[in-house]
Image (spheres, helix red, strand yellow):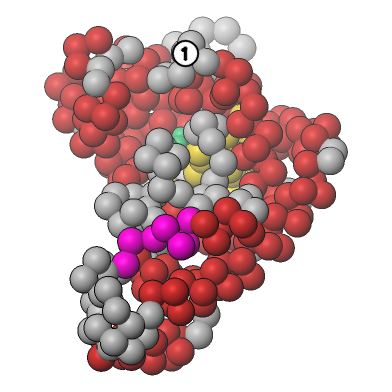
Amino acid sequence: MAKKVILTGDRPTGKLHLGHYIGSLTNRLKLQDEAEEYVMIADAQALTDNADNPEKVRQNVLELMLDYLAIGLDPEKTVFFVQSALPELPELTVYFLNLVTLARLQRNPTVKNEMKQKGYGANVPAGFLTYPISQAADILAFKADLVPVGEDQLPMIEQANEIADTFNRFYGPVFKRAKALVSSTGRLPGIDGKAKMSKSLGNAIYLSDAEKTIKEQVMKMYTDPRHIHVEDKGKVEGNVVFTYLDAFDPDKSAVGALKRQYRKGGLGDVEIKKRLIEVLESLISPIRQKREKLAKDPERVMSILEKGTKKAGETTRKTLAEAKKAMKIDYFR
Ligand code: TRP
């Protein structure tokens, strides 16, 4: 049987954090052993809301590569590439733009949400409003079977599949529907417990954070505001420390015992926070060390990206040729 194709990616706008780790990186790590995996650095998509800040996007391309390699994505197994270097992707996007209405774009819940956050209103950059179409091109160009992403990306995959269906109906069967793969753990809240972990909210713990930073962030974590004295009964639900222990502590039965004790009273917040600091430090410290080593040779890291981009281009050229043939715009050979 042919290997499944995995395509996923991230915008280079910041370093990766624990939310990414739980949301999609663990799935990517697992799948690289059994599938044909592509991981894209979505620099063109990052520019849709950072048009005036190309320096930020550029710097974060290397940061993302360092994160990927440090967590154990292996260039022998995973193909890394950069979106802007493959002109077939924007070309497919142009044809896909004809298959989507403005009303449909305005209904995409993730885009709607981001537009509200950024206060765009009617002054939304056209490239931003249409980025789900370009994301459809990313996914469909590789004929991906699975797309490991965080929950917030589900509407993108739904929209990509609609585009695949419409294209195939108009021009014949070229594209394949993709399935989203989200983590079973669900979305990881930020340390404030309020929303998802995100750079803009300042509530993240990064895979590259120093031990001191991890400590500070965990000590700031939202627990149970009514759990004031050690003897008090505490709430486990909505208590971020326990949410994180559930997500990252390999010793589930120990976590179960801590929860019982916390509920009953007699277990202080500092105690559970200390355990979480240890758990997170043992996850992050090998990543941090590997990252520091890799960061000493950025040229080598960028050459991995260059090599992968060449390889990915073979696939996108092939798919674009098929699409153009189906659309009857393949005039010359
Ligand atoms: N939108 C994704 C993010 O914000 C990045 C992305 C771009 C992507 N193209 C993709 C993810 C294709 C999966 C598949 O992180």
Q: Which residue is depicted at the point 63% across and 31% down?
A: 61
Residue 90 at x, y = what percent?
48, 18
| Stretch of the chain drawn in magenta | 217-223
User: Between 83 and 222, which is closer to the camera in this rendering?
Assistant: 222
Say which residue label 1 marks. Answer: 51
Q: Residue furthest top?
A: 331
Residue 16 at x, y = what percent?
54, 46
Relative side of 243 to 47, left or right: left
Q: Which residue lies furthest to the front in this view?
A: 229
Residue 264 at x, y = what percent?
25, 91
Q: Is mark 1 within 8 Å of ligand 1?
A: no
Element class at badge 1? loop
Rate crowding at label 1 as few (under 14), some (14 to 19) or many (20 or more) other CA atoms within 10 Å: some
| Displayed quadrant of residue 296 | top right
| Displayed quadrant of residue 121 | top left
Task: Name the quarter showing ligand 1.
Answer: top left
Q: Which residue is depicted at the point 40% across and 20% down?
A: 49
Which quadrant of the rendered structure holds the N terminus?
bottom right
Q: Which residue is depicted at the point 34% across and 29% down?
A: 132
Relative side of 50 to 37, left or right: left
Which quadrant of the rendered structure holds the C terminus?
top right
Q: What residue type is labelled 1?
A: Ala
Question: Any magenta on residue 329?
Answer: no
| Displayed quadrant of residue 66 | top right
Image: 94 above or below 164: above
User: Between 324 and 199, which is closer to the camera in this rendering?
Assistant: 199
| Residue 51 seen in this snapshot | yes
| Residue 35 seen in this snapshot | no
Relative side of 271 to 318, left or right: left
Residue 97 at x, y = what percent?
32, 17
